[in-house]
Structure formats: C-alpha cells, structure tokens
Image (tube, grey):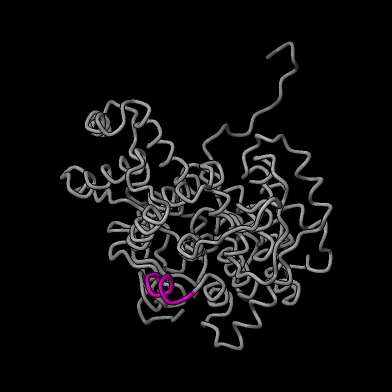
Amino acid sequence: MNNSDKKATLSFNDGTPSIDFPIYEGTVGPDVIDIRKLYGATGKFTYDPGFMSTAACNSSITYIDGDKGELLYRGYPIEQLAVNADFLETCYLLLNGELPNAAQKEKFVATVTKHTMVHEQMQFFFRGFRRDAHPMSVLVGTVGALASFYHDSLDINDPHHREVSAIRLIAKMPTLVSMAYKYSAGQPYMYPMNSLSYTSNFMRMMFATPCEEYQQSDVLTRAMDRIFILHADHEQNASTSTVRLCGSSGTNPFAAIAAGVACLWGPAHGGANEAALNMLGDIQKNGGIEKIGDFIKQVKDKNSTVKLMGFGHRVYKNYDPRATLMQETCKEVLKEMGLENDPLFKLAMALEKIALEDDYFVQRKLYPNVDFYSGIVQRAIGIPVSLFTAIFALARTVGWIAQLNEMIGDPEYKIGRPRQLFTGSERRDVQPIAQR
C-alpha cells in the first residue's frame, strides 16, 4: 500500500484534541484511513458492526468492484480465467501471483495429483456419522481431522509446512466431498485416479461405481471446473475473514480451513445456492410455473416472509460477473442432459426472465447471481442439493489458503482482537443468596 500525502483529521467536541491519520492508497479501489493510533491517542475505538467500513488487512489477491460488476484474481478478470484457464491454473495463480507456464503447470498438477488419496483411517470417521448427516457437518469434522494425520505440516509459521498443507488440502478436498456423498448414498467410495485431471477425477469419484466403466462428459466436467474457478476466491468475505482470524492465533492450517468450512455453511453465505434450489422446489410444489405470478406478488409484499433467493448480491450492485458465465454454462449443461423441458428448469428460466424484465427487480438491481445458476447446473449434473455448499467449500479452499499465506507473510499481522462498545451493567457486588 502507498502512503499518500493526504491526511484525515478527526476533531471532537468533548475537549479531546483533534488528531491526524495517514491515508493509504491501494492500486485500485477506495483509499483507507489508518486509525491504528486512535485508541492510544484518544482512548476511543471506532464502532463498525459487520466491518462494513473497515479494511482489516492489505491484500494483493482478489479485487471486487461491486458497482462495475468486476472480479479480478491477481489482476485477471474472472471472465477471462473461466474461459482460458482451468481450475488448477487458477489455483496456481491465486497461490503464487502469476499464471503458470507449461513446465510450472505440469509440475503443480503432478504434485496435487500425488496427494489426492486420503489416509485409509479416514473411512472410520465417515462411519461415525449418520448416513443422513449434512455433508457440511461431515466436512467440518473431516477437514479438521486431517491435522491428526499430517504432523509434518502443522506449523503455520513455517513456509514449507504451509506449502505442503496447501497442496494436501487442495488435493484431498474433492476426495473428502465425494466420500461424504458416497457415504450418504450408501455406495462404495471410489479412489482417486492419477491419470485424470483434477475435475475429471472429482466427477468420477462422485458418479462412478465399481460395477461399470464411468463415461465422462466433457461438457459436464468443464461446467464443474468452471464452478470451481468462479468460487475460488472472493476477497474478505465472512469465511475468508474467519480463516484469517483463526490462523492469526497460530493454529494449524487444517484447523483454520475447517473454521472457514464452518462459516461457509451459513445460509447467508455459502448456503445461498442450496436456498435458491429449495425456493424453486417450493414454487414447484405450490403449482409451479402457473403460479409464478402469485410467488412474485408475495416477494413484493412487504408484509410477506417470502424471499427471492439467488438474486441480488451484497457486494455486486450490478450484474454478478460470475452469473453471466454460469448462465451460459447452465444452458450448455441443460442441453447436454436433455433437460431444457424439465419442469424445474423451465420454472427457473421463467423466474430469471421476470427478474430481468420486471421494474421492481431491475430498480433494486436484483439480478440473478452465481448461486442461482450454479445450483441449477449442479442439480442437472446429479449433485444433491445438500452437497452444493460442500462443493463451494472445495472450490474456496485455495482462496482461503492464499489469504492465510498472505496474512502470515505480512510483517504487520497480529492476532485478531476486535473491540466492543460495552452496554452491560457497571461494577456491582454479589449478594448472599438469601438477599437476592
């Protein structure tokens, strides 16, 4: 970050002397006011619930311009990466700052591929869960449990340990997610196959059985790879901030990523694509496409509790750039699967049309977001709704690791310790029980 000549002056009307703060300029985006000396100089804290006006770190990984609808990984627009790169190239970029050349890619892919198997003991973890357990609860447990198996990569302050644990996490996440699926379906686990690409391997572990040869579909594999790329990182969101805060205590990388998985599980964060599909299911149950007008009326009604899921975004006040790419992929997948006339997908497309044309939604910028389309794509591929967020976690793992590595390498980082505005009782004395 660049220290500019600009200063911010904070003045008070309670007799506290005014104070100057340095202003830093980023490469792009808003300037930041450095308020680190505020408490020492004035005895006051800032108050910012949800950290909506607070930059908690400086970062060179991902940049979002919500007004323009722009998402850049290390400066590269997401729409270029999704078309011209695959997921492991995107992983390399997020971790190392540059896209790999042919030799670097070959080495990176080979390294990740060699780490895709999980320890055989992990099977016993899965057997401890009920078959109907939510895959995210299984994932929180099993990702955290990886720390029990890899004692040679637990020191978050050792660059080599961080590198080894990063490769292990990226490589093993597809295996754990597919195991969670196979366990819930009562099917045998499929071991990874080193001759396949990262995403082909995941698709095979998900959908193959030992009974027959699995036929890969290039269209479906590419769609899944694109879902991974689009979800790989998204700047300082709730789960990424959780990973950074967790890692700031010096805990091991597996524990920090497990904390990210737990945060992502929330319906306001990673669970949004699950919520969007469940909403479509509810409309379908209540009369489907014929009753879509009634549903829209309820959405517009201030007194109704009905919400439109999968539309609008907290950051993007324009079209979510990831949604444009997923929309295209969505149409390719439905065509490949012969599902253009499936009632649920017809309903989804009718809802999309209304949202793009109805003034109520257009004025409020409630465009379809990435969760809306990725949910439809995953369901078409055959992934159960309950697994959507686990696939999001698989894709986001690399972003979490890149952000964690960046934080550990930052000489200014400290253990996270937010402050509070205390509104409870002042000091008081405990009375004997008879007098309370």
Residue 410 drawn at (x, y percent): 60, 74
Residue 416 drawn at (x, y percent): 61, 58
Magenta residues span 78-85
Foreground: 374 or 332?
332
Residue 97 drawn at (x, y percent): 53, 80
Q: Residue at x 45, y 46 (%)?
A: 273
Give the vertical position of 140 relative to 292 (above or below).
Answer: below
- Side of 290 relative to 392 (left or right): left
Q: Residue at x 59, y 82 (%)?
A: 105
Q: Residue furthest front?
A: 212
384 magenta-colored: no
Give the vertical position of 428 relative to 394 (above or below).
Answer: above
Foreground: 329 or 153?
329
How many numbered circles are shown?
A: 0
Quadrant where the C terminus sits is top right
Residue 335 drawn at (x, y percent): 36, 55
Give the vertical position of 278 relative to 182 (above or below).
Answer: above
Q: Residue at x 42, y 41 (%)?
A: 277
